[in-house]
Image (cartoon, rainbow, N blue to C red):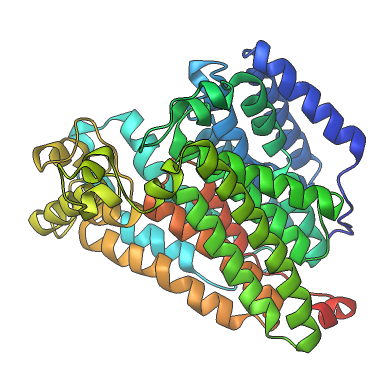
Amino acid sequence: MNNITAHKIPLPVIILVCLVGLVCCFVPLLVTGVWALVIISTVVAAIYKKNDWVWYGIAASPILEVWSRMVKGAPVLDEIGKYYLLLAIILVFIYHVKEETHKPVFKTGFVLIALLLPSLFVNIPGFDREQWVFNILPTLELALLLMLVARERWDIERFACTIQVGVLPIIFIVIYLLVKTPAINDVNFALGANFKAAGGGTNQVATVLGLGIVYIMLSLLLKRPVSARMLCYALIAFLFFRSFLTFSRGGVFASVASILVAVAFAMIVNRKAFYRYTLVLLVFVVAGLVSFNAVDKITGNKLSQRYRGETAATLSGEQAKTWRKVTSGRSTLIMADWIIFKNYPLFGVGPGGAKELRNDLGAPQDSAAHTEFTRLMSEHGLGGLLAAIVMCLFPFYWVNKQKYHLWKGISAALFCMAILTAAHSAMRTNTTIVCYALAAVPVFLRSDNKDEH
């Protein structure tokens, strides 16, 4: 393991990132340059056997991915996050082969590959590269990354550094939201997702804003904050505020649930830990509630109505409040996937093959899967169902295996963020892949840290 110490991110670095983000708002093509720099730095790090730096890029990729989509720097960047992650996986694989690293502590990645492999050949005649990249590539990347993660051996400092670097690109998104989105008073808020306030795809933006909250809170729980504590809490409040403005609920629910899980584990160590983490939780909850109330007031109570699952039609009495309304149509997609699975139970319809069939079963035209677990069932059949079960059960095994309560909480929080994101946003971003992999990293705590954990 490398000798790495997790210090606060230096102010000059933060200023530089702010400047780059500001310039990219007005010269979107420079986003391509940012990605080029990230890719080159990752390759150079791999050449010099700096495996930790490759992981920094992996941790930062979900936020970078969504930021580049928001800025729309170049059409080729739309799925750059997935291609970058594939490159990083190859580089980490080469590192492990050359260094003859540790034996794997689990084989979940191999299991997922084995379960999904037969169904990959089902839809070969109708092969569509875009559909494969959009649907199956992220799931395969998760499996491959788990195969590599099982051979990693980190200490807490390296993990904290990875989280700190991973959250750094959130500054890009904050700058873009402040500079390029309309003034709040100019936004017409209705009882649906608000693209103008989000600066792009509402679900994806809310997801990575929630990821930023999780990264920052985990660094605070580990006593290795990315910056001064008050600045961290102020940034959390702002990320909450902007998440609420998107009117997209999934990212907020996932991040809040993840932090509650982390704190719940941390609180039960002893009385001192209980008081300390109760205070941390209190500040976190206050930041969220103040932000929620502020946005609710700005939007004329539409935010609270949105979170209750109301629409204009349900409020007027024209339509009843149904699960389809409450879930923004996701229940229809889930039911369509279930019907497809029943019709093709053995191998499914192959990667991307369920898209047109969902339309025939009542889903909106050209609607993509929003729930990864039902997509696995419809497109991969029995193997996909088993893969979904493995993805949901492995976290319980792994968290139970950890020795220290705080670390159980950190791992469980990241698993929670990964699974809940997959449940409402499928694999549209790298969030599920990266959070799941980081949650599964074997982290060995040094003796001088044991009293904290």
| Vertical comparison of 124 with 36: above or below | below
Image spot of residue 87 (x, y percent): 58, 38
Question: Quarter-wise, where is residue 99 in the image?
Answer: bottom right
Q: Is residue 152 left or right of residue 301?
A: right
| Vertical comparison of 87 with 152: above or below | above
Image spot of residue 267 (x, y percent): 69, 80
**In this orientation, which residue lies closer to the viewer: 398 or 311?**
311
**In this orientation, which residue lies closer to the viewer: 200 or 50?**
200
The residue located at (28%, 47%) in the rendering is 120
The residue located at (10%, 43%) in the rendering is 361
The residue located at (62%, 12%) in the rendering is 29
**In this orientation, which residue lies closer to the viewer: 359 or 267?**
267
Image spot of residue 65 (x, y percent): 56, 34
Q: How many marks?
A: 0
Q: Please indicate, yes or no, whether residue 10 appears anywhere in the rendered image.
A: yes
Q: Is residue 312 left or right of residue 167?
A: left
Quadrant in the picture for the N terminus = bottom right
Question: Quarter-wise, where is residue 238 in the image?
Answer: top right
Q: Is residue 92 left or right of residue 380?
A: right
Quadrant in the picture for the C terminus = bottom right
**In this orientation, which residue lies closer to the viewer: 108 or 434?**
434
